[in-house]
Image (tube, helix red, strand yellow):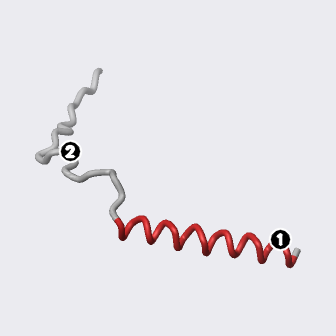
Amino acid sequence: MTHSHSHDHGHGHSHGHGHSHVPDGANERRIAWAMWITGGFMIVEAAGG
């Protein structure tokens, strides 16, 4: 006895992206803050052991 069934995995929406991957000024500032905070913690951890 065989058992067969099908699944419809069709999507009713687009997968396109309408945005640019070039960072703007706000993103660059956020990345810079994250870098400085992370670097500061690394220095404190290295100094504190």
Label 2 sits on residue: 15
Instruction: Identify whether 49 is placed above or below 17.
Output: below
Mark 1 or 2, nearer chain start: 2
Residue visible at 76% across and 72% down in the picture: 43
The residue closer to the viewer here, 5 or 15, is: 15
Residue 37, percent from left and from top: 61, 75
State the image quarter where residue 47 is shown: bottom right
Instruction: Identify whether 47 is placed above or below 20.
Output: below
Number of labels in the image equals 2
Instruction: Identify whether 37 is placed above or below 21.
Output: below
* Quadrant housing the C terminus: bottom right
Q: Is residue 36 left or right of residue 45?
A: left
The numbered disc on residue 46 is 1
Residue visible at 60% across and 72% down in the picture: 36
Task: Name the residue at the right extreme.
Answer: 49
Q: Is residue 1 left or right of residue 8?
A: right
Task: Tell me, yes or no, whether the two marked residues, 1 and 2, touch with CB atoms within 8 Å.
Answer: no
Element on which disc 2 rests? loop
Element on which disc 1 rests? helix
The residue closer to the viewer here, 43 or 7, is: 43
* Quadrant housing the N terminus: top left
Q: Residues within 10 Å of mark 2 (few under 14, many from 20)?
A: few
The residue closer to the viewer here, 18 or 43, is: 43
Camera-near label (1 vs 2) is 1
Residue 22, percent from left and from top: 33, 52
